[in-house]
Image (cartoon, grey):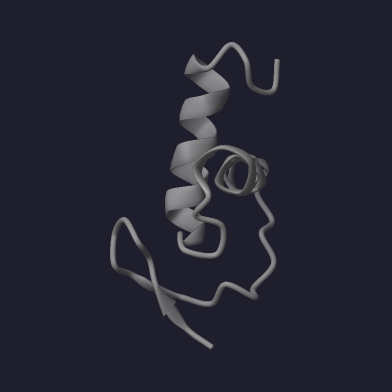
């Protein structure tokens, strides 16, 4: 079932496996910190994950 991303409104398949480390990091944050798991596309998850890895000292360090 396709969904629209909560942030960018791009259509994506939430069942499709994530393959990039930044996407996986973003998914972890979606589950643990933001409560929006399954609502964001892989591109937005990757952006969130990349930013967290660069700027959040409490994440992935």
Residue 36 vs 57, above or below: the answer is below
Q: Quadrant of residue 15?
A: bottom right
Residue 21 in the image: state x and y as whole percent: 67, 42
The quarter of the rendered structure image containing the N terminus is bottom right
Residue 4 in the image: state x and y as whole percent: 37, 74
At horizontal 66% and vertical 47% (from top left) the residue drawn is: 24
In the rendered structure, the answer to whether residue 40 lies left or right of residue 49 reads left
At horizontal 62% and vertical 15% (from top left) the residue drawn is: 58
Residue 18 in the image: state x and y as whole percent: 66, 59
In the rendered structure, the answer to whether residue 49 lies left or right of residue 11 reads right
At horizontal 69% and vertical 67% (from top left) the residue drawn is: 17
Residue 55 vs 22, above or below: the answer is above
At horizontal 51% and vertical 32% (from top left) the residue drawn is: 50
> In front: 19, or 9?
9
The quarter of the rendered structure image containing the C terminus is top right
Q: How many marks?
A: 0
Farthest-out residue, top: 57
Residue 44 vs 56, above or below: the answer is below
Residue 26 in the image: state x and y as whole percent: 57, 43
């Amino acid at each position: 079932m396709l969904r629209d991303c909560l942030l960018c409104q791009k259509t994506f398949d939430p069942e499709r496996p994530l393959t990039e480390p930044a996407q996986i990091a973003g998914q972890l944050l979606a589950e643990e910190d933001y409560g929006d798991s399954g609502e964001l596309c892989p591109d937005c998850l990757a952006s969130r994950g990349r930013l967290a890895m660069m700027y959040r000292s409490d994440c992935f360090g």
